[in-house]
Amino acid sequence: MASPKKPLTATNATAKLAVAAARKLNREVAKLDFREVVPWVYNPLDYAWLAHEQYLLKYARPSCRVLFLGMNPGPWGMAQSGIPFGEIAIVKDWLKIDAVIKKPTPEHPKRPVEGLACGRSEVSGRRLWGLFRERFPNPDDFFETYFVTNYCPLVFMEESARNVTPDKLPAESRAALERVCDQHILQLAEALAPEWIVGVGAFAEKCARRAVEAWSQNKPRSQPPQVGRVLHPSPASPAANRDWAGTAAAQLSAMNVW
């Protein structure tokens, strides 16, 4: 059974805490140097900050019961829009985000950032946000209970522009990144106080469990969030290409968070 809703009077304060946590994450990842392991790195929290901040201020609420956690930005999603799983049509038409997106420096010639004018579709984002929009035509109804974020804010690319996911980084680089990103997830969870953190895919679930373990060690008298997982909606996954929405909805229903 769902717990009683938290009062909405603190919405602005909650959003401000989320914004402060994202600003800190931006500063911390900027200190990390990945040039020896990946030649190209984009940070949407930098060049797409205005859109990301708008998202946090509009939708980070104290009534959040479930925090969805993705891995890192996709090339046609958050890399373009600054919004986790940020399928452009969803960002503009459903989330109603309208902000100037700048350019990353340097910019890979094969991965130009066109912002909200990008004509490419982010399949994972279209599936994830599409499921949410179908159930909640009004985004305010969705964000009354749910919120979506990414574990890592950075886009990693090979010289060919091929995407490199955080789990494929060398151990030392990955450990440095995890220290920063783990801390951010803890700060965001403290701001939102969700009952659940649901990893979108196995990597995100692993990160969520690590954050919750740290929560339990640092706050032994408080109740940490429960952790769950839904199938990642990536088109690279054969399972996701067989009725991803139906599978994800069933998984969420089994956790009693849907």
Image (tube, rainbow, N blue to C red):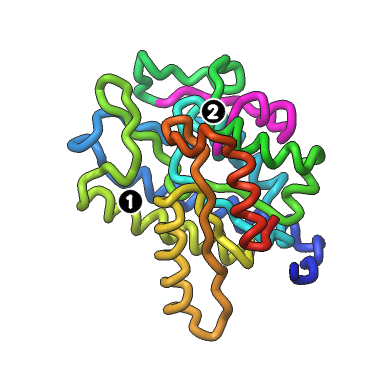
Q: Residue at x 61, y 42 (%)?
A: 53
Image height of 160 relative to 5, above or below = above
Say whether residue 87 is magenta.
Answer: yes
Q: Quadrant of the C terminus?
A: bottom right
Q: As shown in the figure, which amino acid type bears the numbered disc 2?
A: Val
Q: Residue at x 46, y 60 (%)?
A: 208
Per the rendered image, the range of residues in magenta is: 85-104
Give percent across and percent down for residue 32: 30, 46
Q: Of 31 and 198, which appears nearest the observer?
A: 198
Q: Quadrant of the N terminus?
A: bottom right
| Residue receiving disc 1 | 177
Label annotation for residue 108: none
| Residue receiving disc 2 | 123
Q: As shown in the figure, which amino acid type bears the numbered disc 1?
A: Leu
Picture quadrant where residue 117 is located: top right
Secondary structure type for disc 2: helix
